[in-house]
Each structure stands twice: as C-alpha cells, then as structure tokens.
Amino acid sequence: MVSRSYSNLLDLASGNFHSFSREKKRFPRVATVTGVLSELDDDTNSNSVCSDAPSSVAQDRIIIVGNQLPIKSHRTSSGKLTFTWDNDSLLLQLKDGMREDMEVVYIGCLKDQVDPSEQDDVAQRLLENFKCVPAYIPPEIFTKYYHGFCKQHLWPLFHYMLPLNPDLGGRFDRSLWQAYLSVNKIFADKVMEVISPDDDFVWVHDYHLMVLPTFLRKRFNRVKLGFFLHSPFPSSEIYRTLPVRNELLRALLNADLIGFHTFDYARHFLSCCSRMLGLSYQSKRGTIGLEYYGRTVSIKILPVGIHTSQLQSILNLPETQTKVADLRDQFSDQKVLLGVDDMDIFKGISLKLLAMEQLLQQHPEKRGRVVLVQIANPARGRGKDVQEVRSETLATVKRINDAFGRPGYQPVVLIDEPLQFYERIAYYVVAECCLVTAVRDGMNLIPYEYIICRQANPKLNETLGLDPSAAKKSMLVVSEFIGCSPSLSGAIRVNPWNIDAVTEAMDYALIVSEAEKQMRHEKHHKYVSTHDVAYWSRSFIQDLERACAEHVRKRCWGIGFGLGFRVVALDPSFKKLSIEHIVSAYKRTKKRAVLVDYDGTMVQPGSIRTTPSIQTIETLNKLSSDPKNIVYLISGKDRKTLTEWFSSCGDLGLAAEHGYFIRPNDGTEWETSSLVSAFEWKQIAEPVMRLYTETTDGSTIETKETALVWNYQFADPDFGSCQAKELMEHLESVLTNDPVSVKTGQQLVEVKPQGVNKGLVAERLLTTMQEQGKLLDFILCVGDDRSDEDMFEVIMGAKDGPALSPVAEIFACTVGQKPSKAKYYLDDTAEIIRMLEGLATSDQTASTAEVPTKDIF
C-alpha cells in the first residue's frame, strides 16, 4: 500500500500527473537560497490547531530521517552523478529488523553538494530508484549547522566538554543556532512532502535533528514519531549550561518514543526534564514514561547492534583471506593488541599509547613479542583540537618506537590512512585483544565487530592454522565511559584516565588462560549475535507502535508558539471547562454548592507566599454571601491557620486537615470527625521524619493536629524524591499496626488517620441537604492533586443518586491536564480564580427582601 501523498510524489517524479483528481503538489527545491529559511511561528497549517479524525488505513510505512542519506554518490567522466546504497550506513542496515511489507522512505542530506541546476533531476532519480528524498542545504548554512552548532556546541557538550574558553567547543553563537533551526525546518518540509500523517511512522536519528519533532508535531498533531539519540546525554549539571536547554528538551518531548543506548543516558535526560521542566516520570510494567500535557512520552533503553550478516559476508571474501594471511606472516611471532578509533579528542588514543609505553617499561620480556596496532580513522569534525590530537599521537608513537623498537620490530604500528573495510576486518581476526579506551563515547561498535570477526569461519581458520572444532577466544579491554560497556559483561572494564589500570588490564589480557578467553568470547558472542541491528530496529519499532496506540482514542490540539509548541492530548470525556458554560448553568440554578481546594488551586504550587490574596478573599466572600450558595474551602492545613487567613469571610465554610475538622461558617464551632480520636502514632512517626529532615537539606516537617507532613519542595528534586520513597517505606514498616495511612503528594509525604479525606466533606454536604429535603441542582468541585480525587469521586458518584436534583449540573474540575476522576480541567490557578470571579459577579440580582435563609450543615 502506498499512501496518497506519497503516490502523488512518485507520479510527479515519473512524469504522470493524472492518477488522482485532487491538485498535485510540485516537488520543490526546498533550499537554493541563503539565509534563515523559515519562521518558527508559521501557523498557516490547520493541523496545528486540532486533529481529531483518525484514519482507518493500515500502518505499513516508516520514514527514516537522518543527517545523511544511506547513499554513496559518484560523478562519472561525463559529469553525471550516479548513486549506490551505502551498505555501511546504520540507517540502511536497520531495515533488516522491519517486516517485509513495511515500506521505507529515507530523508537526509547527500554527502556531496549538488548544483542547484541538478537538484530536481537528482531528487527524482533518488526517489524513483531508492525511495530517498534529499534535503538540499546551502553550503554556508550547512557549515553553520553541522560544523558550527552540531560540532562546536552539541557534540562537545554531550561529551562533557564545557566551553570554558574559546578553544574548548566555542562559546554559544546565536547565528549557529538559527542555522540549526533552519536546517531542521528544511527536513520538516521534506517530511511533509511524503508523509501520510495518520498512517506513517517517522523515526528521527541523532542530535543533528533534535528540534525536528516540534516542527513535525506542529504540522501534524497525531504524527507517530520516534527519536533515537546515538550520542551520550550529559548529566544535568553539564546540560544546564546550554543556553537553549529548555527548547531542546521540549522539542524532544514532542516525540512519542525517545531512545537511548544506556540507562545512564536516559537517567540524565529524565533528570534534566525534572530539574528544568518540573516533569516527573513513572515506570509501569518495565516501561518508563513522562506525562507531558496529557501525552505519555515513552523512554526506550536499548544499545544498537551491528549487521552480523554483512560482517560474515566480508569475512568470506578472498581479499579478506589474503589480508589475514599477510598479517599472519607480518606478526608471526607477536601478539597483536588492536585499537580502532577516530582521530578525535574523546577516543583516548594518547591514553592507550601511554599505557602501552608503561607496559613495555614494566615488562621488558614483552618487547619484541607484543605489538599495538592503532588504526586511526579520519576525524568527523575539524578544528584545532583534531590537529593537536594528531600531533600528540604522532609524537607519542615516535617516542615509543624510538625507545623500544629495533630492526624488524615496531611496538606501535600507527595506520592513519583510510582502510578498506575488509582490511580492518582482517586486523580484527588476528588481534589477540581489542582495546577501546575512549574517555566518552555514545556507543562504539568496535568491540561488537571484533567479537564477530574472532568467531572467524572455516577458511580463515585454515589460513591461521586453527582447529575448526576448537572453541574460539577473544579478549576485550573497554572504557567504562562508552555505551557498549554495560552490555559486555565479560570485558575488562577500565578507567581510561588511570594509566596504571589500563596497563594492568593489557597485561592480564595477554597472560590470561585460554579457557578464560574462550569463556569470555562465548559470553560476548552469544549477546552480540542475538542483539544485532535487526533486533534493535525491530524492538524500537514495536515500542513505537505501542507508544502511538492511544493516538486515535484521544483528542489532540496544539498550543504555544515557536519552540514552545506542544500538543495537548486528552480523553474525549475530559474537557477544558468553559467559563461561559458554567456561568450559564450557575445563573439558572437555585441551590448551589461550591467545594474548593486551597493549596495548588487557589494559590500557585511552589509559591513562597501561601497566604490568600485580597482578590481571593473578595471572590470567596461574594460567593459565600450569596444565599443560594453553600461554599466550602477545603485544605490540608490546620484549622488555626485557616481561621486566621479567612476570618473576614463570615459565610465561608472551612474544612481543615483534609476534612477532619469542619466549620460551616464563622458563627459556628469547629466540628471533628468521629473516625479517629487517638494520635499516639505521632510519637513514632515524628522522630522518623526528623531523621530524614536532618539528612535532606531543604526539607521541613509540618505538624498538624491530626497529621504529620514531610515536605521536600525546596530540596534537590532527585535526592528529595529518593528520600521520600525511603521515608514512605520506613513509615509504613513502623506504623503497620496503627490506624493511619501514609501517602505521597506533590513533593511531600503525609501520615494521617485512615478514612479521613476530602471526600468526607462532600459526603456530609450531600447527606445533610438530602435530609433537609433541599436537593442541590448545582455543584462545583475544584482541586489539583491526589487528595482531591476523593471529592471528585463522591460528587461524580452522586450524579444519578437521590442526593442531587435530577437536573443537577455537576462540575468536577482539576488543575492541569492529567489523569483524573474529574470531567473538566483548567490550566492553572489564574484560570481557576477567573472562573470563580465570573461566578461571583454573575448572579447578584436578588433583592434584600427576597434573601432566603442561609443553609448550614
């Protein structure tokens, strides 16, 4: 099945313009001019407002978006560009994990610049022959985008290099950021040309395109979008130095699934979301999810694998066998240690060389018997740091060879010229041990390739003179700072900065028993051969399908401007409360009840000032003085505080400590719940809380008459959350036999009597009014957190019961879009106040003579 939008583009590429009756879209040259190419606040597309109509078409196509297309280009003698697949590209290899009927479309840049006059022709040929859509970036924009923002800002920062001076990554440059946005917008435009938004999946790769999810989500609110980061994600202390930190985080959160190689990278991302955006995550049935404006953004942790069948095919080549034979003869009396790294500052080549130098100094018997072959691939970036690494490497190699070399023996063989893939494979086959000492690397698949190559094949075994039936063996020394390290449990893990430790690991790898080498190899080979690139791709797509399964069920619409854009996704029955609608219902009803939570509802969460404003007092006074109304303010605070704060509200009912204490108005006494009368458990719980307060800077204890609250609002969010979990378990264990409940709330842990909750106030109100024969025909209940869900449950449960008028208008409203038993929501406390003000000023027409008696319960 080919989607309609894609078929149009195919028709255009082939010159057929009559397949569909609707207007055809021309295949544009997206970028042939310089400058900033797009505005972030382009809201011309209607899909940025709402998309509620799901599609019934089967989902069988995926659009793979990466910085580069998996294509090699070559210009013939006649000047014509020809193209072939780049079999080494991960984007091409991941197709092995997809269903046979899954169609794949690629979007990315070509490695070579294409003249504007050729761009349309090249685009048509790539689409027809390879299903590839090229993104053309003007050279000056590409330089700022790739060599500027990507390589000078993101890449160093993600590898823990701060721009402490201009030579270390470079200071933030706003023009480079604008170029980055422009290129991401070009990619978004290319996706628009081919996507069928209700049917297709989109998989975006790596840090070059981190804001692309926002552009795509803005155009198509329901787009099925995954993102995988192939580099490390730094700790929050490093990441927070980036001036556009929030913009990138929010852009990534517009994806449905975000993938990382290791738990550490995912943990750092989640910590940044918590510290900078105030978001919390939950783990459910093994899946980590972030709630973001009603959408659940799933987090995937799975290291990428290698294309094992491709390696096997290279191992079977005659050229490989010939090269292996040459290397066998070259190193016939020596053990080969192998390093394969890019020539950049993070690969730790110099540290590896220093360890080799120390090995030869400490073990003279190894001179002439051990050789380190260092293959140095060309650096992907450019700049002063690359030249410095190269100069240092050459100098160190020369020093070692001068000190320990002799005729016919060089302890270090440096290969800094590009090698054919089969030549590199041959070095893997003959190497006794592979060394990876990178100081920071996203994944690094060199150890995986080495393991597969050491398994060899019958012809290579014959070339090396090995018994085909003998168990294979290999040794790995890997840095603990690379992404593949956690999955290689049989490797010798080292801190590359500790030269002594690396030296010892190299020595141990050379002297370890054959049986141990075989055991380690078998363990690694089993993992690498089963967790290949196909497994990685298949697993990611399966999780992406699950993450997008809720799209059709929810109502979606976009809010925000520029990079602050996000999609609100809500259950169809969960709606934003229309102030006009509730005011209309309020006006036509005669017996009304209003139940309002205080903290987080009438006052902003986390606010330093918690006392009610003059505006709040006036609004509550107007509402409670209306004889048609019964108004209760319900809070977890103690009754003394509420009495002081709302002393001027004579007709306002107060419920303190979650409904344990109730006072109908200023002229009545506080009443207490008969559920609990003993509070000896406080003597047990308070010392425990005090212990955690002393060890958690920024935490406090709030002592109430009926409850104890441990608050960590001003503590470190990660440490506070960790301590809260420990405290909750501790309290539950010591209070097992006491009639109390231990619950968590927004940055707090509370111990209170069992059965005491805010729902008691709602139950009492309904029961009293029913007994008096005065059935309510309007009830509004407003709250913001878990403690208010009890109120919502009570009033929603009474909808069809005898406690309310048959025509009663019921409004259960929570603050913010989140899972709730309430039917309505408003965005924040400001909207809550405006709504209450609208009610207070809408019905002030009753004359003094007609004022009925105020109900009290």
Image: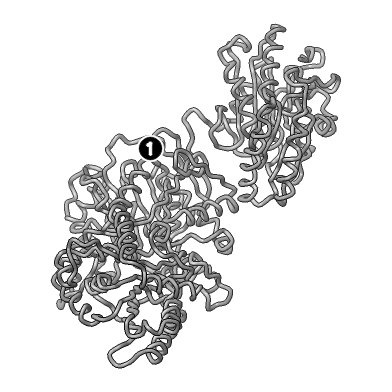
- Of 432 and 2, nearer the camera is 432
- Of 115 and 690, nearer the camera is 690
Crowding near the residue tagged with mark 1, few <14, some 14–19, many ≥20 C-alpha atoms within 10 Å: few
What's the amino acid at mark 1? Ala
Residue 387 visible in image? no
Where on the picture, by quarter, is residue 388?
bottom left
According to the image, label 1 marks what residue? 549
Please name the residue shown 25% across and 73% down the image: 430
Residue 390 percent coordinates (x, y): 41, 83
Please name the residue shown 18% across and 68% down the image: 461
Please name the residue shown 83% across and 30% down the image: 643
- Of 567 and 524, nearer the camera is 524
Q: Quadrant of the C terminus?
A: top right
Left or right of 442? Residue 693 is right
* Helix, strand or loop under label 1: loop
Q: Is residue 741 above or below residue 123?
A: above
Q: Is residue 272 above or below residue 770?
A: below
Please name the residue shown 25% across and 59% down the image: 308
Residue 580 percent coordinates (x, y): 60, 29
